[in-house]
Amino acid sequence: MRKGIPEKTVQRLLLYYRYLFFLLQQGAKNISSKSLADLLEIKDSQVRKDLSYFGQLGKRGSGYDVLALRDKIANILGIDKETNVCIVGMGNLGSALAAYKGFLALGFRIIAVFDNSKQKFGHKIKGYQCYDINQISKIIEENDIKIAILTVPAEAAQETAIKLEKAGIKAILNFTPVKLSLSKRTKISNVDLALELKTLSFFMGK
Amino acid sequence: MRKGIPEKTVQRLLLYYRYLFFLLQQGAKNISSKSLADLLEIKDSQVRKDLSYFGQLGKRGSGYDVLALRDKIANILGIDKETNVCIVGMGNLGSALAAYKGFLALGFRIIAVFDNSKQKFGHKIKGYQCYDINQISKIIEENDIKIAILTVPAEAAQETAIKLEKAGIKAILNFTPVKLSLSKRTKISNVDLALELKTLSFFMGK
DNA sequence: GACACAATGTGAAATAATTCACAAATATGA
DNA sequence: TCATATTTGTGAATTATTTCACATTGTGTC
């Protein structure tokens, strides 16, 4: 079912989800692809094409049922079941992400945070018990964690990523500016903050 | 010169830049599109196509001069001149970004940070003087700031964005999960942390 | 200098993503 | 019930991006 679905489509699905969530609170019962598209400043055909990957979810003449569509998307994206994650590297960014509420709303639960500094482990950071990175195998196994958010300094990125892979992590959200070299089996997604800012400034006013 | 250049190309340019910077430190004089491509796990033709948007930068037979290419990319991306930015919203994420070193390496200088809380303004946060958001017009004018990093809570995002636009901000790096509605003139780039994590988990193991 | 090898630059081809456009289904109102 | 409106779902067309493939240029060796 999730074969050949463009990444962009998955991303938009989440944007649809957020609007549907909001619309439901407003008491909306139905919505057309046109209205949803207008809210996001995209084309209505884009909305319909995206949704069509997952079946015939709408009704000709009246559009989509807001509640049913929201729940369907929640199901497609797995928002309806909890996914455990850990954060590795408790510097400024790691700590900020530990406190970030946006993950919870999408079904993510931060189960553990790791660092390599004796000063930090054993203590609580943003309410989470901080563990020694070398204990990771034990803790991710005990807690069924498959996803790690990597926020260590660039110098430590590659070696830490290898530790994560060995420990059984299947996907890494990589906030370091390092191209991680791991087996094809491990899924990596890069969030490069400086790159985003540079791209923005390049196209500014264009 | 920067008309019709794909955003993806600009992003890769920065990745090339980082590797060239590193290679130069290693003492490399020349590099082929093939070697550079292999480091990034992309195709060599992609590297050449990307660079070809900006002229004939290589030399047949021997490849690209590392120093010259690095400097050319720095020039294209404007890394060689400083760009002033501000951060708006000094919660966890805003504070973490204020301390983030990666911006500096690309020519960005954080000039001011803003918040709306009396507890915060007047004080220093991560070494930066925190100002009242309502003073923004004055401060961005005085300091020639055209770019803002927006890290306020979702509820305050749209109203704050309007303030930024009114004050003369031309580009916003938006970390809130809100679709900002501003004039076409203002360039917006969205960094949606929860979306990145959800996309990653969707494709995990696929 | 001539020959073999290396590597670019770039049209053309292939692939991917978006948008169009319209038949089909549903809704609405007289 | 019938005519008209709406709105989906989806092939086809378009547009964007990547990859191919090769002529051309430069390098190194004898």
Image: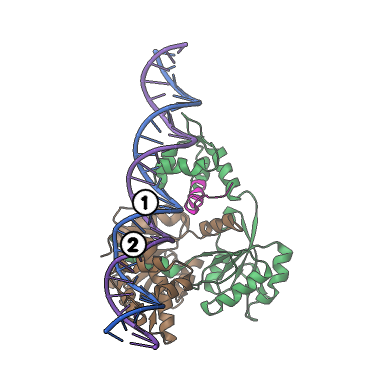
Chain colours: A brown, B green, C purple, D blue
Residue closest to the eye, B13 or A194: B13
Q: Is residue B112 visible?
A: yes
Does residue B25 sit above or below A97 in this rendering?
above
Does residue A111 sit above or below B49 in this rendering?
below
Within-10-Å neighbours for mark 1: few <14, some 14–19, many 20+: some
Question: Magenta stretch mostly in which secondary structure?
Answer: helix
Q: Where in the figure is residue B136, as x and y percent of width and height?
A: 68, 72
Looking at the rendered structure, the kind of residue marked 2 is Ala
- Give the alpha-carbon distance from disc 2 to disc 1, as whole Å: 13 Å
Boundaries of the magenta span: B1-17
Looking at the rendered structure, the kind of residue marked 1 is Ser
Q: Is residue A27 magenta?
A: no
Q: Quadrant of the C terminus of chain B?
A: bottom left
> Which label belongs to residue A181?
1
> What residue is at 42 percent from the left and 69 percent from the top?
A44
Within-10-Å neighbours for mark 2: few <14, some 14–19, many 20+: many
Q: What SS does tag 1 mark?
A: loop
Q: Where in the figure is residue A174, as x and y percent of width and height?
A: 42, 60
Q: Is residue A114 visible?
A: no
Q: Is B186 situated left or right of B30 in this image?
A: right
Which residue lies under the disc numbered 2? A171
> What residue is at 25 percent from the left and 65 percent from the top?
A1
Discs 2, 1: same chain? yes
Q: Where in the figure is residue B123, as x and y percent of width and height?
A: 66, 75
Q: Is residue B15 magenta?
A: yes
Q: Where in the figure is residue A150, as x and y percent of width and height?
A: 41, 62
Q: Is B46 situated left or right of B106 in this image?
A: left
Q: Earlier in the sequence, mark 2 or mark 1?
A: 2
